[in-house]
Structures are given as structure tokens and as C-alpha cells.
Image (spheres, rainbow, N blue to C red):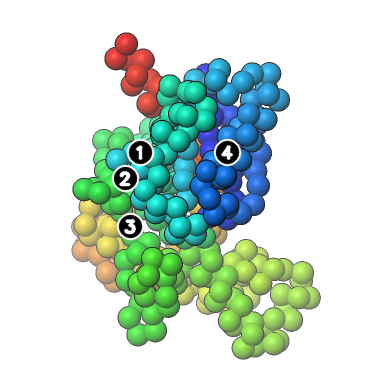
Amino acid sequence: MRIGAIDMGGSKSIVAILDENFEILITKRFEGHEKDYNVHFDRVTALLGECAEELGTTIDELDALGVIPPGMVQGERTLLLAPATGWRNVDMIGEFEKRTGLAVVATDCDVNAAAIGEADLSGERDFLWYNISNGIGSAIIMGGDNYPGATGVSGELGHVKVEYDNPRPCPCGQKGCTEAHASGAAIGRRVVQLTDEDPDWAKVFEDKGYPKNAYGASLLAREGDEKALAVWQEAGKYIGRSMAVGLNVINPPRIFVGGGVSQSLDLLLPEIRRQIDLCTVEFARNVPIEQSRLGYYAALKGAAAIAMRKYHKQEETR
């Protein structure tokens, strides 16, 4: 099989073709988003065509296509809202069927799709998927399938309020959300704030050539820098409070953590565990928390997973 995958993430778009084992055969990308979704969709479709051509094929010879838009998806079809671009109420499947001519096009938000990919790759059938990247999202997998909720936006633990005394504004319009305090972007903002306040600490980053963001702080934390460790401890506190809500509500047997910030899960876990012990009922606490098996391209592999599922479902009904 050859499966097309398009991930229109928060800051970039990645296009790829994968095989049935989730191996990426080719990938291309570009930064940013077009304000007009028609222009953006044309651009990613053209890039998919380039990928197919380099593999000696064409788009219409792909078995299926999975598309991840930068926002919430309802009914596995409609993009409700992409906050970064203002795209609203877009028929994702119709738009990409029209552009590619493919009979099998699947779509969902990045978190739901990645959770499906995790289920298919790991064989686990019940878990909470928790994604920490530029934003924070989560998904609930039950019996191997995503539980979408009444309007397709279940599992929004990134928008659980975790700070009331000094709440920071969140892109969702609320204040004090987990995403506003513990996402990769939030950690980066905290690093910038602290280095602005402390020129000596800023000089530590500069002397080592580390960026003043979450990644740079992770490098310093692993070298034992107390301020960097405190930044990660603070983020872990908020993530732990958020995860505790999920544990109390759905009592999953396992949590998988994906997204770029999951590469620093070891720095977050001590405080996550402490908050879970503080905020969770006794019988829901002792749950494994593991880094995702999907790696950096979790959303792309998730796009391929939902596309393959739809392809096989349609084959079964023929």
C-alpha cells in the first residue's frame, strides 16, 4: 500500500507518502499557513504530487489519503475552526476528494489521529493519549477506537484550568489552561521571561549557544541547571494536574505522551507523578506513563492510520 499523509500543523505543513507499516517513504514540508484555505490546500496537494512523482507514481494511484487540519474536526469530516488561520466550517473530505480524485480520504484532528496511530502500532486498545507540542491536546482510546464525544472535541485536557491565582491567556480564549502554562510554546515564553529578568541566566544560554526556548532549557536542565530544572518542574506541575482530571474521569490503564515536548518526559515525570498523587483518587494513580512509539512524525503516521482504517473498511463492504 501507498498512503498519502498531510499534516497541517500549528507552524508548518508536512506532506508524505507511507507504506502499510507506517514507514515514511518520502516527505516534504513548508513553514507557515496561507490565510485562504483554498490556496493552502492547493499548495499541499501540489507537494503531495511532487512526492508521488519522485516515487514514480501519481496522486490518483495512491490507495488513500489522510489529512490533518490545524484545528478541531467534527464528524470525521468538518474542520470547525483553525484558530491560527481563521478557517471555519470546511468540508475537509470534499475539498481533498475534489483536488486528488481519490475515493478514500480521511480526516481528523492531529491528536485523535495520532492516538489511532498509537493504537494500531502498539496494539494497545485502551489508553489516554496526551500530546505536548506547541499546544496541548489529548484523546481517549476505548476498545481501539477514538471516543469523540458529542461534538467531536472530547479529551480537551489542554483546556482544563490548572492555574487560578496567576492565569495566563490561552489561544482558546480562556485563561489558566494547561496549554497556556505547560505547552512547548508556554515553556519557551517562560524561559524568555526569566532570562529577561535575569541577565546572568540569559548569558548561560548565550555562552553555551543554546536557544532561549523549551529545547534550550531541556539541555540546561540535563546539565543540572537549577533554574532550568525549576521551569520543567513548573510545567510538570500543570501537566500533572491536567492528567489527574483524565485519570479521575476515565480511569485509563495507560497514558501515552506524544509531541515534541515528550522528548523531555523524563524532566516532567517527577512532578507529574507528585501532582497525580495529590489530585487523583487512590485507585486511579498507579498508571504507566510512557513516551509514544510514533516519534516525531506522530501526526503524519496518525493521518496514515485513519486513512488505512477507512480504506480497509470500504474494502470490507465491497
Residue 156, disc: 3
Q: Which amino acid does label 4 sit on?
A: Asp
Q: Name the residue under label 4.
A: 42
Give yes or no for contact between labels 1 and 2 (Cβ–Cβ under 8 Å).
yes
The amino acid beneath tag 3 is Glu
State the CA–CA distance, disc 2 to disc 4. 22 Å
Which residue type carries mark 1? Arg
Earlier-in-chain disc, 2 versus 3: 2
- Is 242 in front, or is 28? 28
Q: In this view, does 47 lie above or below 176?
A: above
**Badge 1: residue crowd in 10 Å (few <14, some 14–19, many ≥20):** some
Q: Which of 248 and 35 is in front in this view?
A: 35
| Element assignment for label 4 | helix
Between discs 4 and 3, the one toward the N terminus: 4
Per the model, the C-alpha gap separating discs 1 and 4 is 18 Å
On the image, numbered disc 1 is attached to which residue?
A: 77
Instruction: From the image, tell me which residue sits under label 2.
Output: 74
x and y, in percent, of residue 197 in the image = 62, 88
What distance separates the C-alpha of mark 4 from that of mark 3? 30 Å
Q: Dot 3, crowdedness within 10 Å: few (<14), some or many (≥20)?
A: some
Q: In which quarter of the image is the C terminus?
A: top left
For label 3, the SS is loop
**Where is residue 304 drawn, in percent x and y?**
48, 32
What is the number of the mark on residue 218? none
Q: How far apart are marks 1 and 3 (CA)?
A: 19 Å
